[in-house]
């Protein structure tokens, strides 16, 4: 029995691995339909005036990098195309290196200059207090950038004091941080909030989009693939969707087979002793 | 195939494979990887907290800029460590009380506003006046789901008759919600695996 269970697990592990590796090596090219939640974010950024200041809070750590990096990358591409002034920050200590790398990489690709087009503010502890104080004055929370240069010495910070001067606040997160951004930055100060969330968290964001507390949101790798479709720049999101689709099909088949097997074994164990196919009437 | 010449990529790839080796069984490679992860994370977090909190938020305003208000914050912070001394541990209650009071003060009203009042307002819209058939059906299902789930959690009366029927619809709604949540969780976990395979096949081996 233990051997059979181990064998079944081995089959599932290999099945999942192959259903990911094969589509990555030989892409199929499934199309991605764009959802209204993602389109709303895209439309909002498209409608923003040139040079709008945008806060990007990279509230995630390496464990969820595979889901959130592709969407952050796609949105940075879009924002730099619109010449937005991007202020990167993070509310998690593990997000510093990730945010810094991604900002540098995309800024270099788009020829954006530090201090003029983008900034990295670094990590600040106590996220909710930071969200609230930024509603009064961003410089109170971040008197300097990550590298110790005073914020008011950067040309891109001219005229930017608090959320009233910020076009959009974007939060990427694998936790409940997006709800807090909506609660404090939007509900209290009226900031427009967009979200990039892991698929696990995305299911909780629909009510906030319906209520207008969030402009829209990108959920998981699918959200990243949808955004890449909209900006016509294929990246890890679109590349990963074939593997995602095939592995989901494999998992659904396994769930169906597992349930059929369980039902059959239950039916056999009930019927075996006396040949009956149903429980005896008391 | 163009394997990466970067030793950092090789180290990351070897550690990834060591992590996957747990699927076979617990083994020394996995143990080494696990201990490295814990050690490196602890060191990284310590540096980030020390630089971002102690240096930027305390040392610079207090010592460099001479803002004495931060001395009070430093004393409150140090009082937390009184827990280490049993006879003086009561001192640690003051900073905790301050933190709880401030946290409750700014979070309770805004939580009620953002997560209760706003959500109730969306449920109260006229779902018949939504513009399209799909939107009307969605609005009706949202209304039905919210009301029946709330009735399912109403325990002051026995779930029989109308209340019983409504709570049954409520539990079906909950099950659909849990199913959607589980589906998203599967998608999330598979994405993490895709990310690792993209790294192994692309960044490391150069196949992609």
Image (cartoon, coloured by chain):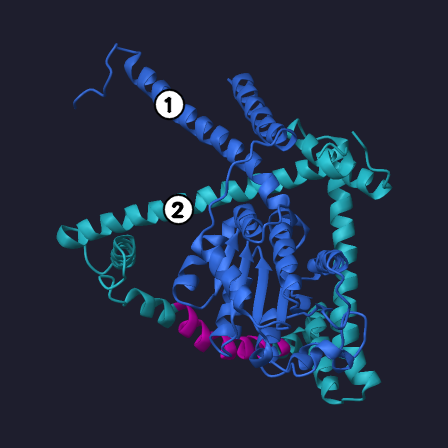
* Quarter where residue A278 is shown: top left
Tell me which residue sits at (23%, 13%) in the image: A276
Q: Viewed as shown, does residue B68 lie left or right of B170?
A: right
**Helix, strand or loop for disc 2:** helix
**Residue A84, percent across and down?**
64, 69
Chain B color in figure:
cyan
Residues in magenta?
A: B95-115
**Residue B94, percent across and down?**
62, 79
Tell me which residue sits at (34%, 45%) in the image: B175
The reply to the same-chain question for discs 1 and 2 is no
**Residue A22, percent across and down?**
61, 27
Which chain corresponds to the colour blue? A
Q: Chain of mark 1?
A: A
Residue A155 versus residue A64 in the image, above or below: below
Q: Viewed as shown, does residue B206 lie left or right of A253?
A: right
* Quarter where residue A73 is shown: bottom right
């Amino acid at each position: 029995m233990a051997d059979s269970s181990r064998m079944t697990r081995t089959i599932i592990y290999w099945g999942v691995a192959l259903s990911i590796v094969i589509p990555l090596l030989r892409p199929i090219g499934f199309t991605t339909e764009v959802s209204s939640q993602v389109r709303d974010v895209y439309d909002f950024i498209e409608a923003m005036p040139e040079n709008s200041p945008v806060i990007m809070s990279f509230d995630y750590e390496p464990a969820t990098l595979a889901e959130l990096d592709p969407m952050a990358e796609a949105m940075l591409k879009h924002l730099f195309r619109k010449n937005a002034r991007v202020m990167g920050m993070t509310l998690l200590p593990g997000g510093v290196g990730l945010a810094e790398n991604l900002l540098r990489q995309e800024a270099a690709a788009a020829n954006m200059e530090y201090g003029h087009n983008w900034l990295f503010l670094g990590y600040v502890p106590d996220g909710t207090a930071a969200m609230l104080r930024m509603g009064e004055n961003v410089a109170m929370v971040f008197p300097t950038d990550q590298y110790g240069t005073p914020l008011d010495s950067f040309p891109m910070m001219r005229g930017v004091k608090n959320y009233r001067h910020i076009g959009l606040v974007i939060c990427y997160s694998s936790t409940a941080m997006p709800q807090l951004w909506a609660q404090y930055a939007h509900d209290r100060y009226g900031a427009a909030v967009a979200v990039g969330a892991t698929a696990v968290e995305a299911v909780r964001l629909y009510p906030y989009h319906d209520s207008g507390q969030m402009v829209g949101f990108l959920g998981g790798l699918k959200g990243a693939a949808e955004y890449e479709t909209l900006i016509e720049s294929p990246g890890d999101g679109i590349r990963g969707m074939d593997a995602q689709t095939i592995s989901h099909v494999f998992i659904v088949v396994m769930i169906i087979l597992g349930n059929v097997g369980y039902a059959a074994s239950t039916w056999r164990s009930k019927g075996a002793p006396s040949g009956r196919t149903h429980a005896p009437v008391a | 195939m163009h394997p990466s010449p970067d030793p950092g990529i090789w180290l990351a790839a070897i550690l990834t494979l060591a992590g996957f080796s747990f699927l076979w069984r617990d083994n020394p490679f996995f143990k080494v990887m696990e201990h490295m992860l814990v050690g490196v994370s602890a060191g990284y977090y310590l540096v980030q907290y020390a630089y971002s909190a102690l240096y930027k938020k305390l040392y610079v305003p207090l010592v460099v800029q001479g803002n004495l208000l931060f001395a009070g914050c430093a004393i409150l912070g140090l009082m937390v460590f009184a827990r280490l001394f049993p006879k003086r541990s009561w001192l640690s209650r003051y900073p905790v009380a301050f933190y709880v009071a401030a946290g409750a003060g700014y979070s309770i009203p805004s939580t009620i506003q953002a997560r209760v009042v706003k959500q109730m307002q969306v449920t109260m819209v006229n779902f018949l006046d939504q513009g399209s058939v799909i939107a009307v059906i969605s609005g009706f299902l949202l209304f039905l789901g919210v009301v029946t789930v709330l009735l399912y959690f109403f325990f002051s009366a026995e779930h029989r008759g109308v209340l019983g029927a409504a709570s049954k619809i409520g539990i079906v709604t909950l099950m659909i919600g849990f199913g959607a949540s589980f589906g998203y969780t599967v998608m999330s976990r598979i994405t993490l695996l895709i990310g690792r395979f993209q790294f192994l096949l692309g960044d490391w081996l150069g196949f992609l």
